């Protein structure tokens, strides 16, 4: 089999780092010299800058995206006996946070064209125990927020936007994370806006929720050594905030380049289906996915033989995971999520991907 010496990873963090290396290293040194390491001036500045960028009143940083989900649920008083509806086609953290509160996870299937949760399926799952919906803006495209918010208002439900893969995405002109009751973000190194380690954030336009979120992330405390409720230890450190402040200045440019790459893929890859983009949403392409109806694993291996990385997000939907076997679901209970897990393949997409590398990927797929 013919091969190329050009190795094309799914994501190249070193290429991004080389662009901003001097500024990042100086910022890190400045933090170390300040000896102010946790929730200092960089954290405060990043919260303000992120809130302004997202068009939201409050941005509350925390240690990681998983904590952001859990803290959001605690702030909404989700507890044992409650039910929270979410998608089975997502990373485990989305539903894991529900289980951590003692509430019950209720899955609703996805729209097979977008891979985001289907608002019609959400409504079918609502009971008198339902208290909230966690939607996921999967791969960087917004879920159908108008329909989801209408369902939530009709049934008096809270809405959490899991925007871990969608920092910068717009829905009808509004950034995701500013539409529901609370938005949650991850800045894990693979994300479009990424830290040099774990970091996360919650967003809200509700002043009282913002107070709860800030209190819960520091052991339920508004002032040191006085604790008003059960909280967690989930604080962003100064080094991560300093790095995120630098990257935030570039995020629109980086996301635009991802969109340009996606357009090249759209035009060049004609033998596999990519997700449909809804007109209300922009797409920041945290991942570029194709659906391969047969021989996906063979295609993945053939790409690897040519030096091209690919990945399956996600190979097993949550309702089939051992973690959730207590819910008693069968594989076919959520057929669209099941099919997505069997057909999806994510191919390289990152802002530093060159036109030559794009050509190699497209030709290999064709």
Image (spheres, grey):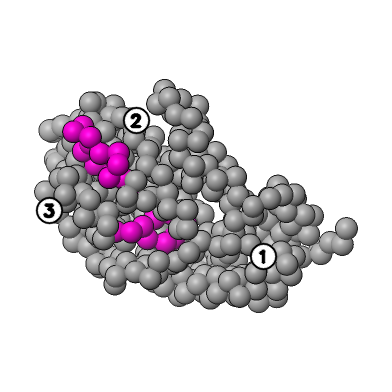
**Is the C terminus in the top left, top right, bottom left or bottom right quadrant?**
bottom right
Residue at the extreme top: 326
* Numbered badge on residue 207: 3
- Span of residues in magenta: 122-145
**First in residue order: circle 3 vs circle 1:** 3
Dot 3, crowdedness within 10 Å: few (<14), some or many (≥20)?
few
Q: Nearer the viewer, mark 2 or mark 3?
A: 2
| Gap between marks 2 and 3 measured at Cα | 27 Å
Disc 3 element: helix
Give residue 90's quadrant in the image: top left
On screen, residue 104 above or below 281:
above
Query: Which residue position is annotated with label 1?
Result: 271
Q: Nearer the viewer, mark 3 or mark 1?
A: 1
| Residue 289 appears in the rendering | yes
Tell me what residue is drawn at x 37 percent, y 38 percent: 107
| Gap between marks 2 and 1 measured at Cα | 40 Å
Tell me what residue is drawn at x 51 percent, y 61 percent: 275
Disc 2 element: helix
**First in residue order: circle 2 vs circle 3:** 2
x, y percentage for residue 99?
34, 30
Q: Please name whichever residue, 235 or 327, is drawn nearer the observer in this view of the structure.
A: 327
Q: Is residue 263 left or right of residue 324?
A: right
Q: Is residue 298 left or right of residue 227?
A: right
Query: Which residue position is annotated with label 2?
Result: 99
x, y percentage for residue 15?
60, 66
x, y percentage for residue 237?
36, 49
Disc 1 element: loop
* Numbered badge on residue 106: none
């Amino acid at each position: 089999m013919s091969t190329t010496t050009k190795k094309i990873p799914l994501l190249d963090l070193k290429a991004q780092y080389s662009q901003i290396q001097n500024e990042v290293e100086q910022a890190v040194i400045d933090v170390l010299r300040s000896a102010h390491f946790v929730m200092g001036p960089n954290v405060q500045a990043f919260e303000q800058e992120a809130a302004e960028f997202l068009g939201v009143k409050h941005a509350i940083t925390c240690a990681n995206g998983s904590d952001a989900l859990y803290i959001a649920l605690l702030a909404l008083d989700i507890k044992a006996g409650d039910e929270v509806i979410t998608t089975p086609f997502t990373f485990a953290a989305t539903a894991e946070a529900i289980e951590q509160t003692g509430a019950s996870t209720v899955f609703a299937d996805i729209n097979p064209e977008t891979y985001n949760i289907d608002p019609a399926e959400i409504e079918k799952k609502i009971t008198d125990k339902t208290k909230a919906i966690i939607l996921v803006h999967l791969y960087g495209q917004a879920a159908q927020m108008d329909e989801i918010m209408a369902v939530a208002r009709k049934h008096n439900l809270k809405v959490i936007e899991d925007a871990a893969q969608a920092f910068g995405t717009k829905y009808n002109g509004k950034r995701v994370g500013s539409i529901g009751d609370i938005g949650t973000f991850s800045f894990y190194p693979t994300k479009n806006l990424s830290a040099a380690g774990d970091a996360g954030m919650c967003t809200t336009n509700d002043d009282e929720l913002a107070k709860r979120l800030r209190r819960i992330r520091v052991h339920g405390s508004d002032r040191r050594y006085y604790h008003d409720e059960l909280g967690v230890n989930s604080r962003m450190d100064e080094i991560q905030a300093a790095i995120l402040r630098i990257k935030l200045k570039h995020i629109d440019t980086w996301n635009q380049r991802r969109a340009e790459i996606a357009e090249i893929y759209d035009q060049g890859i004609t033998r596999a289906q990519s997700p449909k983009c809804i007109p209300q949403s922009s797409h920041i392409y945290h991942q570029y996915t194709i659906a391969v109806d047969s021989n996906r694993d063979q295609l993945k291996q053939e790409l690897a033989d040519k030096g091209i990385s690919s990945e399956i997000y996600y190979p097993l939907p949550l309702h089939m995971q051992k973690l959730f076997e207590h819910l008693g679901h069968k594989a076919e209970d959520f057929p669209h999520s099941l099919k997505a897990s069997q057909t999806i393949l994510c191919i390289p997409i990152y802002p530093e991907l060159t036109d030559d590398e794009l050509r190699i990927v497209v030709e290999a797929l064709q």
